[in-house]
Amino acid sequence: MAAAPHTIRMHERDNVAIVANDGGLPPGTALPGGPTLRERVPQGHKVALVDIAAGAPVLRYGIPIGHAREAIAAGRWVHERLLQMPEARGLSDLPMATRPAPDWAPLEGYTFEGYRNADGSVGTRNILAITQTVQCVAGVTDFAVQRIKAELLPKYPHVDDVVALEHGYGCGVAIDAPDAVVPIRTLRHISQNPNFGGEVMVVSLGCEKLQPERLLPPGSLPIADARGEALDVVCLQDEAHVGFMSMVESILRQAEAHLQRLNARRRETVPASELVVGVQCGGSDAFSGATANPAVGFCADLLVRAGASVMFSETTEVRDGIAQLTARAATPEVAQALVREMAWYDAYLQRGSVDRSANTTPGNKKGGLSNIVEKAMGSIVKSGSAPIRHVLAPGEKLRGKGLAYAATPASDFICGTLQLAAGMNLHVFTTGRGTPYGLAAVPVVKVATRSDLARRWHDLMDINAGTIADGQATIEDVGWELFRFLLDVASGRKKTWAEQWKLHNQLVLFNPAPVT
Ligand code: CA
């Protein structure tokens, strides 16, 4: 027997709901307390609950996600072709820091086992990272990393991994262009990620534009500076190197000194306030905003109440909710910074002759998301309801607790790379269509929006928020499950699926500046 028809309506004002049943619902299905379907509606797609006149707003999350291009009868499938997308909200006359902060009791007593660093940050993993100034050295570094893993790592059992910070930048770029600051500071700050323990070593070619001293100028490495050490650089063009193997041996020799120090470190009990959690979504569907993202938002509130740092990002996916964000800013200055980042991104898109509507993918649409407005309303709920205390431009480092907006593109790899630079030590990723995304530098906890995905991808998804749509769990239940899982993963007691399978996506730098 087929499951009873089940739809999800997000707000009492909404004149559409999404179909929750696996496989969608056939024509003739009578919705409980609603109309009878006039056509098949796929899972995650919208059905008109009442007759909607031509030109009238189609409401989801209580706001217009578009206007009807023609009259839409109750029971019809409301797909993207029936919707005229609204203009983006302007950036003037916004409510600035108007919403009072929630009256929350602090959440006390939660801890995890982490690696405390000399600069005060805390790692969730103990990894040797090898920074590169330029793509030219990537092959040599990778060769050396394979040997380090085979020959050195077994001698240092307290070190989790060795990671080459490979990227496409460093030469063939307009290095003095104003926007070049973005990729350069991104690389600099990634080298300082808490999971690398302050052990920075650099492989350089020698002739590249991004010289090691420009990437990591004196004073930028607080831990090495405190030890009175110079920047540790292996330069391949150094005349001392005769033949490829002498370069590889140099990298191994330098790496061993760092491995010895990393190996001496031990986890210690630290408060949950030392977590720096980056949240993002990818491969989203119409369930994202109803299940996984609200659960992540609930968990974000728990983290903020525990004194931790949480950052959300993805500028094109919050742009349509800018009025919500500026209202939630802790101060007018934070609200202004939000407007600054949105305006910068509007101009960046305009330079490429597109706007925010370039965001949605074929998969998003197949999953029921008609346009970027609908996607944004579902995406923004990942941020929970805490006041926004900090705003970071792309590549900047987070300094401070509470909720932060780290401005990044929505591209999964670029967002993840920029959140690494901001200093995250855990990453939470929600997906509806499914993605095997993972990073080498921090654990990535993946949250499925639908039980069907969680069942099929049972060894890739860490948390199933589809239980919310199934009626088996509440948003609060899944939020708490995620919170506890994060503490276990941070402590090394549990591994994420992406860690178990070593699924590592590349670092992808955001470079808004010209290449030459
Ligand atoms: Ca994304």
Image (cartoon, grey):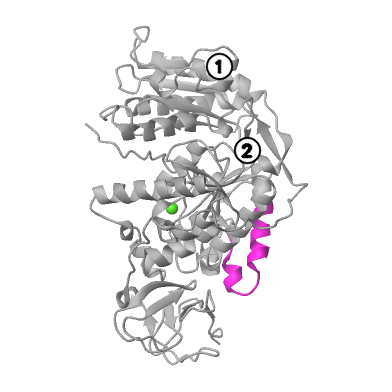
Quarter of the image containing the C terminus?
top left
> Label 2 belongs to which residue?
124
The vertical placement of 369 against 215, above or below, is below
The vertical placement of 54 against 93, above or below, is below
Quarter of the image containing the N terminus?
bottom right
Residue at the far right in the pictured view: 109
Q: Is residue 431 visible?
A: no
Q: Position of residue 460 (x, y in %)?
A: 53, 55
Magenta region includes residue 98: no
Residue at the far front in the pictured view: 93
Q: Position of residue 75 (x, y in %)?
A: 42, 88
The residue stretch that appears in magenta: 463-484
> Label 1 belongs to which residue?
225
* Of the pair 123 and 387, the residue shown nearer to us: 387
> Which disc is residue 405 wearing?
none
Task: Tell me which amino acid carries mark 2.
Answer: Thr
Q: Secondary structure at mark 1?
A: helix
Q: Position of residue 256 (x, y in %)?
A: 55, 18
Residue 172 is left or right of residue 291, and the answer is left
Q: Position of residue 120 (x, y in %)?
A: 64, 30
Q: Quadrant of residue 490?
A: top right
Task: Tell me which amino acid carries mark 1.
Answer: Asp
Characterize the magenta stretch by its predominant secondary structure. helix
The vertical placement of 103 against 119, above or below, is below
- Residue drawn where x is 34% and y is 9% of the image: 242
